[in-house]
Amino acid sequence: MSPTICSNYFILEAFDRELLWCPVAQARFHVADVDALRTIVGEDADDDPKLDDGYYLDDGQVDEVVARFDIQLDRSEFCSGDIEFRLYRWHQPDGPPWFIWDMSCRCS
C-alpha cells in the first residue's frame, strides 16, 4: 500500500525550554515500518501499537530516529541549551497553520 497524505507520517519536534518556550524546529518523516520506530521509543510505547500517542525522547532515542529515518538535524543551530524532543504522529491540519518559522531569531 502506498502512503496516503496521513498514513505513517510522524513529527520530530524540538522544543526550546530555556529561551523561547516554544517549538523551534519540526521534521515530518514517513515511517514504512511503525514497529521499527516503536522499538526505538521503547517500553513507553508497549501499549500503543500504532504510535498514536506523543513521546518525549532522550538524546539516544533522537539520534536513533535521526539515523534510521534520515532526518537532517544539526543541534548546533539551536540557541538554547535546553531542547526537549518530542515524537508524535502527524495529522492533516484542519485549519490554518499555527507554527511559522521565524528566521530572524538566530544565534549570534
Image (cartoon, grey):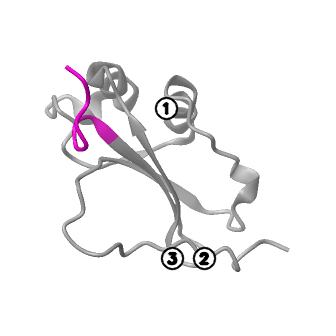
The majority secondary structure of the magenta stretch comes to: loop
Place of residue 92 in the rendered image (x, y in percent of width and height, measured from the top left): 23, 55
Marks 2 and 1, how far apart at CA = 25 Å
Q: Give the spatial CA distance, label 3 vs label 2.
A: 14 Å
Query: Which mark is on residue 102?
Result: 2
Residue at the image position 56 percent from the left and 37 percent from the top:
71
Sequence-wise, the earlier of marks 1 and 3 is: 3
Q: Is 94 on the left or on the right of 10, as rendered?
A: left
The residue mark sitting in front, 1 or 3, is: 1
Residues marked 2 and 1 touching at CB (< 8 Å)? no
50 above or below 86? Answer: above
Q: Left or right of 68: which side holds 90?
A: left
* Residue bounds of the magenta highlight: 1-9
Q: Is residue 107 magenta?
A: no
Q: Earlier in the sequence, mark 3 or mark 2?
A: 3
Please report the residue visible at 35 percent of the width from the left and 29 percent of the height from the top. 31
Q: Amino acid at mark 3?
A: Trp
Q: Nearer the viewer, residue 46 or 3?
A: 3
Judge by depth and name the residue closer to the eye, 20 or 4.
4
Alpha carbon separation for disc pair 1 and 3: 23 Å
Q: Nearer the viewer, residue 62 or 26?
A: 26
Tell me the amino acid under the disc marked 1.
Answer: Val
Quarter of the figure that contains the N terminus = top left
Query: What kind of element bears circle 1?
Result: helix
Q: Which mark is residue 65?
A: 1
Q: Which mark is residue 21?
A: 3
Q: Secondary structure at mark 3?
A: loop
